Image (cartoon, coloured by chain):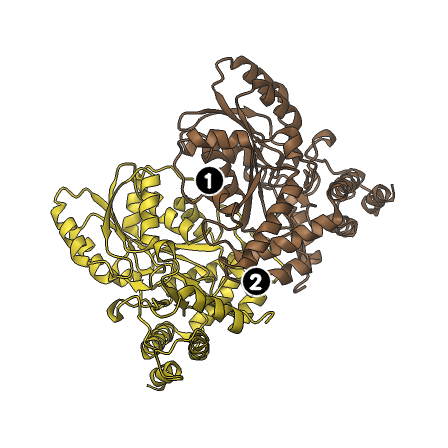
Chain colours: A brown, B yellow
Amino acid sequence: MDNKLMLMIPGPTPVPEQVLLALAKHPIGHRSGEFSKIMAEVTQNLKWLHQTQNDVLIVTASGTGAMEAGIINFLSPGDRILVGCNGKFGDRWAEIGEAYGLNVEKVTAEWGQPLDPEQFREKLEADTQKQIKAVIITHSETSTGVLNDLETVNRHVKAHGEALIIVDAVTSLGAVNLPVDAWGLDVVASGSQKAYMIPPGLGFVAVSPKAWEAYKTAKLPRYYLDLGKYRKDAAKNTTPFTPPVNLIVALQAALQMMQAEGLESIFNRHQRLTSATRAAIKALNLPLFAADNAASPAITSVAPQQVEAEQVRAIMKKHFDIVLAGGQDHLKGKIFRIGHLGFVSDRDILTAIASLEAALRELGYEGSTPGAGVAAATRVFAQ
Amino acid sequence: MDNKLMLMIPGPTPVPEQVLLALAKHPIGHRSGEFSKIMAEVTQNLKWLHQTQNDVLIVTASGTGAMEAGIINFLSPGDRILVGCNGKFGDRWAEIGEAYGLNVEKVTAEWGQPLDPEQFREKLEADTQKQIKAVIITHSETSTGVLNDLETVNRHVKAHGEALIIVDAVTSLGAVNLPVDAWGLDVVASGSQKAYMIPPGLGFVAVSPKAWEAYKTAKLPRYYLDLGKYRKDAAKNTTPFTPPVNLIVALQAALQMMQAEGLESIFNRHQRLTSATRAAIKALNLPLFAADNAASPAITSVAPQQVEAEQVRAIMKKHFDIVLAGGQDHLKGKIFRIGHLGFVSDRDILTAIASLEAALRELGYEGSTPGAGVAAATRVFAQ
């Protein structure tokens, strides 16, 4: 049905009406007092969202651009780095490191499994020469729906003492507790089209004083993504290059909504959506791709056996106008992914599960009692 | 007055209502058939706008990001390049080259003067060893309102035979004739918030087959702005990284408007707006910063003597809600700039000139007969 589309993918996520209307305002000049006022406000609110006093800088780029900025500003050619790889995005950060001539050592796990913090500990403890310059971790691995144990890995990085911790928080920031200062995270990158509830186009990078120390001697070439330029101009509430004014105004509206809801409520809501989704999938007797103790608050991956994942997605789209994500790379056709981050309510989960039950029925799936999924989700919401 | 803002700066430029409404649509999934259809259409229309069969790739970035992509994809450390520098943006491309370790040779002119093509000819003819790998030219120098003689410089580059011609067309593309194929331009970069009539956030890079040959051996590191990835995915009507869906939908609407107006009409309109603005400024006896034979079709710079440029801007903003641009770097306070590119009509020029006359009057300026500016602009429009 025209104009009925419901996005349940891990980005772009649904955008609230007041954010869309902010987006549609006539642009204002970016070298004006009015715009500087907006920049000052969003910068403050970004720090609130990140639970940090560190700089949080805005770049015009996708999440990958933000991550690249998070890598190239703090390292030099040949630097040894550890990269956690248990999905498409971990692999991507390894690729960026290699593209820039870093000495990349991967710490891997099967896609769908969390990274093992012990492997990081061993490598970091063995590095008595302190040659490891950074550890890069994808907090919520969007490709699989796995939440990596960042807190523990970070503890091992802190014990090492030298290495920076660089975090891909693209689908975790604003969905799960990520206290940047309390944990001492050096570089945290995220993107607008996720829990921020605005369309894609903005990347965010939080940078600690320790990371700025590394910046001083980092030798990888950079210009457009040179965060030093952004920091210098952010102090004057402006930007080194023309910012996407409309997206910044939309960001202002979205951050105001997030502040009104409150951090704890936002995290609780994402936890509740995740629990309800997973309870429903279990009640439908469909295999969850990630284990309960490593479940991302942003996305739930399902690996159906008796039905084809792509057929489920096709019917969900065709009959119910609900967009689910498919598997990426070697998981293509093997899983489907239900996004539940950002502007998503309990009602949306009931809608998605009810529609999923109908789609399964249409595919002749008989592995569960009709209504079992909705009933299970309802039980979670009733708690 | 609230909500009365009129932008007459060289970007962001005014955005038509139907483009704003397109921007405010709920985002759709970027890995969908619907989005691929939009990508296919905008790609075709971008080629039309560039008058080229070359690839025209879209990056999520400001114009500077597009230019950086235009440089780092085709060159290697130590490569000798000639960069035309007669304003802030020429200087910026030299800075990017230096940041990436290129051997940058500047060809300079005073800010406000056009580059001398003869200086390029001499250097290119002297380079019998064919060591010059690229010549970088800012077509319309936004900081001064000067249009450089790209056509002649390009002829000298073609006579050299080896060097690529890399063009900053950020404020010229869509405002003045720039036949990419007819002239054989290798790399042409532009940005969305200019003649495209959409908000900032998208960069565009047109790439010739000769530039793709250079890409094969170019050794500067890159990942997020690696145009090879964009080319590969563009062939499948998709993108390597999450595109700013809403801006792409806005681009679709804007390009449809441009097609309806027609290239020749668009160029004629910009020429007419420029002529009318310059005629008015002359009639007001204010000094134009760029000469008639080097006037940008995007922006007119004025260097007032008897009044302060910044005071003119302040009154234009305060009393008439018209935003003019100031001077940049050492031109700060010395010039003001009237943007007239993109969604700008004859009426807008009359409005701006009439308001400018009133502002001058308020500042006690007596260098011209009241109404002389509007009369001069009117005469141009009547032709």
- At horizontal 74% and vertical 47% (from top left) the residue drawn is A360
The residue under label 2 is B23
Q: Say whether residue B10 is visible.
A: no
Question: Is residue A78 depicted above or below A10 in this figure?
Answer: above
Question: Is residue A157 depicted above or below A43 in this figure?
Answer: above
| Number of disc labels | 2
Q: Viewer-proximal residue, B361 or A251?
A: B361
Q: Is residue B162 left or right of residue B257?
A: left
Callout 1, which amino acid? Gly
- At horizontal 39% and vertical 31% (from top left) the residue drawn is A219
**Helix, strand, or loop for circle 1?**
helix
Instruction: Please give the chain letter of the residue carrying mark 1.
Output: A
Q: CA distance from mark 1 to mark 2?
A: 31 Å
Q: Nearer the viewer, mark 1 or mark 2?
A: 1
Q: Is residue A233 left or right of residue A337?
A: left
Q: Is residue A351 left or right of residue A217?
A: right
The quarter of the displayed image where residue A168 is located: top right
Label drawn at residue A228: 1
Q: Residues within 10 Å of mark 1 (few under 14, many from 20)?
A: some
Q: Say whether residue A296 is visible.
A: yes
Question: Is residue B62 depicted above or below A279 in this figure?
Answer: below
**Helix, strand, or loop for circle 2?**
helix
